[in-house]
Image (cartoon, rainbow, N blue to C red):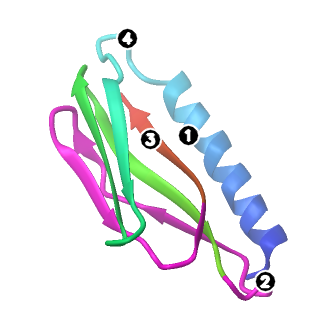
């Protein structure tokens, strides 16, 4: 898949995530006090949210060393606040890292 297609996928995922946040019931509070760790040497990333309800996950975007391959989206599993979302990453260049939250 080329970079333009991945950009479209990323934009759709961002819009979808925004819609999920907009429709969350008021009884839930999104996870807060969140932080992430990125270890490119050992090839892993993790997120942790200390408070709130709902779930979070680590999200990493990397660029493949072959330009025709494009971007590599990597995400960890959804986990409740108070637990760690962990994922392995590739040896490619990391473009960005963020934490998705819901609920």
Q: Nearer the viewer, residue 34 or 17?
A: 34
Q: Looking at the picture, does residue 16 appear above or below residue 9?
A: above
Q: Earlier in the sequence, mark 1 or mark 2?
A: 1
Image depth: mark 4 or mark 2 in front: 2
Q: Earlier in the sequence, mark 1 or mark 3?
A: 1
Image depth: mark 2 or mark 3 in front: 2
Which residue ends up furthest to the top in the rendered image? 26
Residue denoted by label 1: 17
Residue at disc 3, secondary structure:
strand
Q: Earlier in the sequence, mark 1 or mark 4?
A: 1
Q: Nearer the viewer, residue 7 or 86?
A: 86
Residue denoted by label 2: 67
Relative placement, left or right, of 88 versus 59 is: left
Relative placement, left or right, of 63 versus 101 is: right
Q: Nearer the viewer, residue 64 or 8?
A: 64
Q: For the magenta stretch, what is the residue range?
A: 65-94
- How far apart marks 1 and 3 lie (CA) works out to 12 Å
* Image-quadrant location for residue 80: top left
Residue beneath the point at 25% across and 19% down: 52
Q: Earlier in the sequence, mark 4 or mark 2?
A: 4
Which residue ends up furthest to the front in the rendered image? 41
Residue beneath the point at 38% across and 71% down: 41
Asked if the residue under mark 3 is in contact with the one under mark 2, i.e. CB atoms within 8 Å, the reply is no
Residue 90 point in image, percent of width and height: 46, 77
- How far apart marks 1 and 4 lie (CA) works out to 17 Å
Residue at disc 1, secondary structure:
helix
Disc sitting over residue 99 in the figure: 3
Disc sitting over residue 26 in the figure: 4
Image depth: mark 1 or mark 4 in front: 1
């Amino acid at each position: 898949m080329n970079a333009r297609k991945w950009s479209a996928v990323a934009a759709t995922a961002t819009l979808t995530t925004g819609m999920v946040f907009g429709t969350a019931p008021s009884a839930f509070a999104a996870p807060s006090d969140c932080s992430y760790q990125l270890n490119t040497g050992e090839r892993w990333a993790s997120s942790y949210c200390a408070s709130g309800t709902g779930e979070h996950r680590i999200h990493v975007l990397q660029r493949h060393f072959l330009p025709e391959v494009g971007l590599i989206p990597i995400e960890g599993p959804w986990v409740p606040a108070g637990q760690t979302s962990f994922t392995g990453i590739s040896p490619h260049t990391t473009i960005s890292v963020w934490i998705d939250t819901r609920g």
